[in-house]
Amino acid sequence: MTLSLTLPTAAGTLAPYALRGTTPVKPDAGIKFNRIVYSAAHVVSDPLAAIDPWLQCAVDWDATIAYRRHLFSLGLGVAEAMDTAQRGMGLDWPTSLELIRRSLDAAKDVPGALVASGCGTDHLNIDEVKSVDDVIRGYEEQMGAIEALGGKLIVMASRALARVAKSPADYERVYDRILRQAKQPVVLHWLGDMFDPALAGYWRGSDQVGAGGTSDVDAAMDTAIGIIAAHPEKVDGIKISLLDKDKEIAMRRRLPKGVRMYTGDDFNYAELIAGDGFGSEPTHGKSDALLGIFDAIAPAASAALGALAQGDTEKFHAILGPTVPLSRHIFAAPTRFYKTGVVFMAWLNGHQKHFTMVGGQQSTRSLVHFAELFRLADAANLLEQPELAVRRMKTLLALHGVEG
C-alpha cells in the first residue's frame, strides 16, 4: 500500500505527497573503507528533565551512546563533542567532557572503532578573555582533560582566539604551543563563519581582515598551511568546512606529506571524497571525511564508502549522489542551524523517541523546511522505517495545525 500524507509547500499551500517506496540501501557487513571517515554525531536531549531548556543542558545518555554504537556498527568513526553535538549552541564543556568519556568507553567494545574529540576554549567566559595567553590556557585545560581519558584531539576553532588575535602570528603562537604538547597527532579544525559567525577572520587576526591584496580565505590558508608545515608529525589532518570545493582542493594539494584533508564540505562531499587523483602523494588527490551530514545519512554513507573501497566508483556516486540535495537543504543558510535537520532525521528513522533538542534548537527551522527535508530524504532512499517516518511527520504536522 502506498504511504501518503499532506505536506506544506514553499508557496504556502498544502499538497498531497506519496512516498516512493524504494528500499533504503544497506551496507555490506564487514567492508573496510579506503578512506578514514568520521561522522560528527548529535546528542539526544532528555525531554523529561526538569530544566530551563534554553539555559541548561540535559542529555539522554542511553540514547546518545546507542547512536554512537549505531555509527560504529556501520564502520564510521565518531567525531565527538563537535558542533553537530551543539557544542557552543547548548552543550557546555562539563557535559561535553562526560560525552567524550562515555563515547571512549563505548568504543572499547568495538574493534577498530575511531573516536576523536573536540578540544576547544568554550568553557572560558569570552568577555574575560583578554589575551592570547588566556586562550592557550583554555586549550590546555581541555586538552589535559581529554588526553587523561586517552582521547585523540580535534583542536576546534576558538571563538575566543578569533576575538583577541590581531595577526597570523597570534594563531601561530597558540597552535605552536598546543601542537608541541599533544600526545598524539591531532586533527585541526577550520570552521567557516557560515557555520559560526563568531569565527569570522579566523587564522588572520583583526588587523589583517579586509587588508586587501590576497583574498581573506587565501591568506587564512597560508597561515594554516604554515602552522601545519611547522609541525607535520603532530598533525593527522585538517578538517575544513568552507562549503567551497575549489578552496578545499587547493589546500589539499598543498598539505605536507602524510597530512590528510578531512572534508567538512556538506555541499560537495561526494566528489571530494572520490577525489581527482592529483599528484604523487595519495593525500593530495582525495579527501578523507569528517562530516555532520554522515550522522543523518549513515547507512548510505557506509554503503557508498564500501563500494568505493571495492573500486566501484559508479556505485559510490549512485548511492551518495542522491543524498547531496538533502544535505544542501539541511545545511542551507543560516547554516549554523543544520543540527536541527540532523536530529529531525534521527527522529524520523526511529533512533530517538522525540524531536526535542538541547537548547530548544528544534525551533530553528520552519515546518516548510521540515516538509522539504522529508521529501528529499525519501528521494534519497533514507527513510529506514517509512511507516514510522510518516506517522512522526504527521505528528509534527498536527502540532502545527495541519491535519490529514
Image (tube, helix red, strand yellow):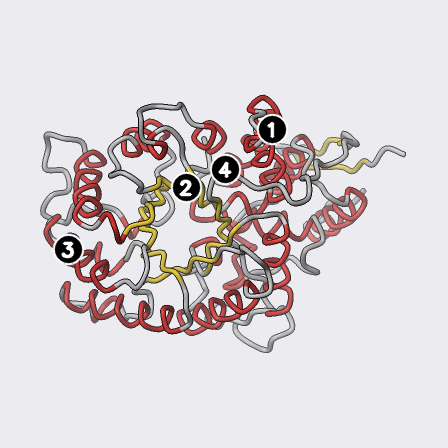
> How far apart are the alpha carbons under marks 3 and 4?
38 Å
Q: Earlier in the sequence, mark 2 or mark 1?
A: 2
Q: Which of marks 3 and 4 is nearer the N terminus?
A: 4
Amino acid tagged 4? Asn
> How far apart are the alpha carbons under marks 1 and 4?
21 Å
Amino acid tagged 2? Gly
Point out which mark residue 322 bears. 1
- Residue 18 seen by the camera: no
Residue at 27 percent of width and 38 percent of height: 257
Mark 4, residues whose alpha carbon is within 10 Å: few (<14), some, or many (≥20)? some
- Name the residue that disc number 3 marks: 165
Eyeballing the image, is 21 above or below 400? above
Considering the image in quadrants, where does the C terminus appear? top right
**Does the CB distance between marks 3 and 1 fall below 8 Å?**
no
- Name the residue that disc number 4 marks: 34
Secondary structure at badge 2 equals: loop
Residue 14 falls left or right of residue 4: left
Amino acid tagged 1? Pro
Residue at 18 percent of width and 31 percent of height: 215
- Name the residue that disc number 2 marks: 264
Residue at 47 percent of width and 53 percent of height: 84
Q: Which of marks 2 and 3 is nearer the N terminus?
A: 3
Front in this rendered view, residue 315 or 263: 315
Q: Earlier in the sequence, mark 4 or mark 2?
A: 4
